[in-house]
């Protein structure tokens, strides 16, 4: 592990290896691909689509020492709960959701705003 990242197009290096920032070394990294007006193919298979000029693990070969696995949340009584707040536009629905979530940390909001927030942070 040289603590670098680089871009490959059709198995050919398209950029020089760039060093990973010090603050990211030793942490789990989540790859992201962004694009516009084109098609992207991502290989999650057992072998690379083309030979590479270096050795690396494919997604299906990742070992526990190279990944972080988190256990799924499971309620003690085995019963899951979903809450669907219903509100009118511009009537402070998200204010209520924010207040509810601040008092109920075990809930996760799934909404347009949280998906957009996640996308902006990615």
Image (tube, rainbow, N blue to C red):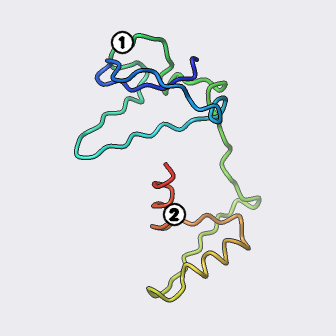
Asked if 29 appears above or below 66 in the picture, the reply is below
Asked if 15 appears above or below 51 in the picture, the reply is below
Q: In the rendered view, does 118 fall on the left or right side of 28?
A: left
* Crowd class of label 2 (few under 14; some 14 to 19; many from 20; radius 10 Å): few
Question: For the N terminus, which image quadrant?
Answer: top right
Asked if 29 appears above or below 107 in the picture, the reply is above
Front one among 33 and 83:
33
Residue 57: x and y, percent? 51, 19
Mark 2 or mark 1: whose residue is earlier in sequence: 1
Residue 120: x and y, percent? 47, 55
Q: Rounded to the nearest whole Å, what is the CA distance between mark 2 and mark 1? A: 39 Å
Q: What residue sits 54% from the left and 76% below the top?
A: 84
Disc assigned to residue 51: 1
Front one among 37 and 85:
37
Q: What residue sits 37% from the left and 43% below the top?
A: 34
Which residue is label 2 attached to?
114
Residue 43: x and y, percent? 38, 29
Quick one: SS at disc 1?
A: loop
Q: Which residue extends farthest right?
A: 76
Asked if 69 appears above or below 64 in the picture, the reply is below
Front one among 2 and 51:
2
Q: In the rendered view, does 117 fall on the left or right side of 96?
A: left
Q: What residue sits 30% from the left and 25% below the top?
A: 9
Quick one: SS at disc 2?
A: helix
Front one among 37 and 78:
37
């Amino acid at each position: 592990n040289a603590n670098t990242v680089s871009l490959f197009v059709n198995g050919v290096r398209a950029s020089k290896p760039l060093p990973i920032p010090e603050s990211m070394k030793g942490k789990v990294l989540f790859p992201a691909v962004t694009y516009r007006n084109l098609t992207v193919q991502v290989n999650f298979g057992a072998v690379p689509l083309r030979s590479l000029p270096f050795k690396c693990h494919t997604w299906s070969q990742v070992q526990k020492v190279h990944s972080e696995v988190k256990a799924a949340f499971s309620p003690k009584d085995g019963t899951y709960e979903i809450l669907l707040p219903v509100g009118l536009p511009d009537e402070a629905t998200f204010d209520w959701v924010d207040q509810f979530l601040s008092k109920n940390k075990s809930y996760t909001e799934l909404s347009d705003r949280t998906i957009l927030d996640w996308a902006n942070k990615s």
